[in-house]
Image (cartoon, rainbow, N blue to C red):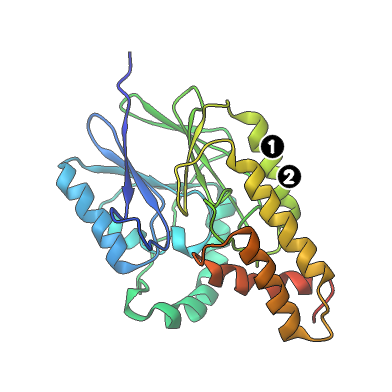
């Protein structure tokens, strides 16, 4: 029987963490799943690799948002290893990184990685990579929570999934990219794909189970409905209305800034704002 790989989550202290990333420990090495956002967190993850005393074999990416790739340079730390992602993820990161640098750099200052490493090895939907006897299989969703999303299944039974940001764990969500229709469609696609005892390792909080599909769908639908029904003749009041309603659904302040950043872009997509 194959050995069950060990999953390590970073940062180790999860309280207040902006985003999660993971190491999958195999018999002879480790594989990184995502690359974190902040320099300090990414360096902590690299130190975790060094403590395990096993070489980094590869990295895989769950989607194209910078909080999942920006710290890759610190994590790979000069190792010549492949960084796998579907071509659409690679293309999106390459096209959008300069703009993300202008927006996110000033927000995080020295914690924003100045030298960012991009995925360099394309992989197609349903294709797998194997390390020792551990297999990771990619799902190329296309646009969803981000402009291009690519969860990874660990093993053959599809009971362990690195889901990226398809589910947020009772935290406020980022919808500013505007693909909420596709996201809702992918929720149903993924819900049908995995068994009831599946465990999802996600970017924000978790791990969670299949019960969270309903919560996530409800959040997206409520957000879009509330933006749609707000009185945009008074934009500031409209935004305040949306924020207040979403705080009722998700009382935590965690990642509220992501939700607030999403209000006006979604209003614009709905034709309510220029």
Mark 2 and mark 1: Cα distance apart in space: 6 Å
At mark 1, the secondary structure is: helix
> Residue 75 vs residue 37: left or right?
left
Q: Position of residue 95 (x, y in %)?
A: 57, 67
What residue is pinned by disc 2?
185
Label drawn at residue 235: none
The residue sitting at 24% across, 37% down in the picture is 29
Q: Is 243 drawn above or below residue 248 in the view shown?
A: below
Pointers 2 and 1 in contact (CB under 8 A)? yes
> Residue 54 vs residue 160: left or right?
left
- Crowd around label 2: few <14 · some 14–19 · many ≥20 (10 Å): some
> Residue 113 vs residue 190: left or right?
left
Instruction: Return the residue nearer the eye: 117 or 163.
Output: 163
Quadrant of the rendering where the C terminus is positioned: bottom right
Q: Is 35 drawn above or below residue 27 in the view shown?
A: below
Label drawn at residue 189: 1
> How many numbered markers are drawn?
2
Quadrant of the rendering where the N terminus is positioned: top left
Q: Residue furthest top?
A: 1
Q: Position of residue 10 (x, y in %)?
A: 32, 52
The residue sitting at 81% across, 74% down in the picture is 230
Instruction: Return the residue nearer the eye: 192 or 116.
Output: 192
Instruction: Return the residue nearer the eye: 173 or 33.
Output: 173
> Is residue 77 among what the camera can see?
no
The residue sitting at 53% across, 43% down in the picture is 151
Q: Is 222 drawn above or below residue 206 in the view shown?
A: below
At mark 2, the secondary structure is: helix
The residue sitting at 35% across, 71% down in the picture is 113
């Amino acid at each position: 029987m194959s050995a069950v790989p060990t999953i390590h989550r970073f940062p180790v202290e999860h309280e207040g963490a902006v985003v999660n990333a993971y190491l999958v420990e195999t018999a002879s090495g480790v594989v990184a799943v995502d690359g974190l956002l902040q320099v300090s967190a990414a360096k902590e993850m690299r130190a975790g690799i060094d403590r395990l005393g096993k070489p980094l074999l590869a990295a895989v990416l769950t989607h194209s948002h910078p909080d999942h790739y920006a710290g890759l340079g610190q994590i790979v730390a000069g190792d010549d290893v492949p960084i796998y992602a579907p071509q659409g993820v690679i293309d999106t990161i390459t096209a959008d990184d300069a703009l993300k640098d202008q927006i996110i750099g000033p927000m995080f200052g020295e914690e924003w990685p100045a030298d960012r490493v991009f995925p360099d090895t394309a992989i197609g939907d349903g294709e797998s990579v194997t390390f020792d006897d551990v297999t990771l299989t990619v799902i190329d969703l296309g646009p969803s929570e981000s402009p291009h999303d690519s969860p990874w299944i660990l093993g053959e039974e599809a009971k362990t999934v690195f889901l990226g940001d398809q589910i947020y764990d009772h935290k406020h969500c980022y919808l500013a990219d505007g693909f909420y229709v596709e996201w809702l469609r992918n929720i149903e696609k993924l819900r049908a794909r995995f068994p009831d005892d599946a465990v999802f390792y996600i970017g924000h909080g978790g791990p969670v189970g299949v019960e969270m599909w309903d919560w996530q769908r409800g959040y997206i639908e409520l957000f879009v409905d509330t933006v749609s029904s707000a009185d945009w003749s008074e934009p500031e009041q409209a935004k305040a209305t949306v924020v207040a309603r979403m705080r009722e659904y998700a009382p935590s302040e965690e990642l509220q800034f992501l939700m607030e950043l999403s209000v006006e872009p979604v209003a614009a997509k709905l034709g309510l704002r220029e």
